[in-house]
Amino acid sequence: MRASLRRPARRLSRLLALGAAVAVILGAPVRAVHGDGPPPLQATIFFQNPPSNLTYSPTTPITIVLQLKNMSGAPVITTAGFGGDVFRRLFFTTPTGGTVTNTAEALIHKDSQPSFCFSRQRVLQTPTAIPVAPVQVLATTYATQFVLPDARQFYPLTASGRYTVNARIPLQTFTASDPTAVISDCDQFPDQQVVNVAATTGRQSFTVISNSLEFVLSRFVSSGFLSPLVNDSACATPPCQAFSFGQVVPVKLQLLSAAGAPIGTATATLSVFQLAGSSPAVPPTMLGAGAANPGNQFRFDPTSSQYIFNLNTRVLARGVWRLDVQISDGSTQSVQIGLQ
C-alpha cells in the first residue's frame, strides 16, 4: 500500500519538475539566479525618420530601431535563437498610465519547448531528465539591429496622447566552466554542447532594459501651418518667415481624418515661447486680435475647413518666437516666427 502511494507522488514531483523546466524556456524562470551587476548586453532604441515634433498622425509609421550589443568584453553563452524576436519585447506606457505589450508574445513562445537529456555517459539522470536547449554563443563583438517598420502592426496603439516606450529583454546566461549549466556529455546530444535551462548554479537571469523614448499619437492628420506662415521644415535654420512687430498674423491649419476628410470637432489653443530677443514689457497671456479669438482658442471656419487664430504680435516683442498649437487629442503643432 505504501509503495502504491509513493508512486503517484513520484509521478507528481516529476511532472512539477518538468513543468518548471518548461516555464524556464518560456521566459518565466524558476529559481533563477539573478545576475550580479549590469547585464552583459546593452539595448538601445531610437526612432527612424521621426516627425520633427515627435507627433505621429494616423498615417505616419512609428518606425523603431532596436540595437543590441555585447558590452561584457567576453563571449556570452545563452540559448539558441536569442534575438530572433526581441523587437517584440517593447513596452509602451499609455497616456492614462497603462501598459501596451505584444499580445501575441505567449503564442509565439508557446512553440519553444525544451529538449531533454535523459542520461550522461550512460548514467540515467534522476529524479527527472534535464531540460536542455542548444547553445548560442554571442561573440565579444556581437552587435545586431532590428527595425520595426511600424509599431502599430504589432502593438494596439489606439489612444491619442503622449507615450513612452522602452525594450525589456529577458536573457539567460550560462557559465561555461559549470558542468551542471553547460553540458557536453549528454548521450542524447553526442559531440554537442547544450545548456541546462533549469540549472541552479552557473545560470543567471537578466532583464536587458533599454533607454526610453517619448512620442505623441494624434488622431488627426495635420496639414501643417498654412500661408502666411512657413513651416520650420521649409528652411535650414528656422524661423523661415519674419513679420513686422505689431502686425496681426493669421495662424491657420487643417486637421484631417486618416481618409483625408476635414475634421472640425477638435479644439485648438495657441501659446507662445520666446527663443530670442528682448522680453515684452508684460508677459503675453491673451494673444488674440479682436473678439474672434477668446481665450487664445482657434475658431473653425467651415467654409475653408481651417482652424484660424489672429495673433496680435503687439503683445509680444521683437525677436524669435515659437508658436505652439495644442490640439485636444494631446498633440502639439509648432512653428517659429521672427518679429522685426
Image (spheres, helix red, strand yellow):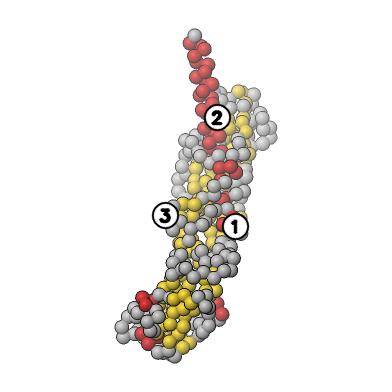
Residue to which mark 2 is pinned: 18
Quadrant containing the C terminus is bottom left
Looking at the picture, tell me which residue is in the foreground, 258 or 66: 258
Separation of residues labelled 3 and 1 (CA atoms): 23 Å
Q: Residue at x 47, y 35 (%)?
A: 31
Residue 116 horizontal side relative to residue 285, left or right: right
Q: Residue at x 53, y 41 (%)?
A: 27
**Residue 38 location (% of width, % of height):** 47, 50
Instruction: For marks 3 and 1, give the one nearer the viewer.
Output: 3
Measured along the vertical axis of the image, is residue 263 above or below residue 236?
A: above
**Residue 115 location (% of width, % of height):** 62, 33
**Amino acid identity at mark 3:** Gly
Task: Tell me the SS state at disc 1.
Answer: strand
Task: Tell me the SS state at disc 3.
Answer: loop
For label 3, count other residues whose C-alpha is less than 10 Å away and answer few (under 14), some (14-19) or many (20+): few
Separation of residues labelled 1 and 2 (CA atoms): 35 Å
Residue to which mark 1 is pinned: 148
**Amino acid identity at mark 2:** Leu
Looking at the picture, tell me which residue is in the foreground, 124 or 157: 157
Residue to which mark 3 is pinned: 97
Instruction: For marks 1 and 2, give the one nearer the viewer.
Output: 1
Looking at the picture, tell me which residue is in the foreground, 57 or 293: 293
* Labels 3 & 2 near each other (Cβ < 8 A): no
Earlier in the chain: of badge 1 and badge 2, it is: 2
Task: Tell me the SS state at disc 2.
Answer: helix
Q: Residue at x 59, y 39 (%)?
A: 110
Separation of residues labelled 3 and 2 (CA atoms): 37 Å
**Amino acid identity at mark 1:** Leu
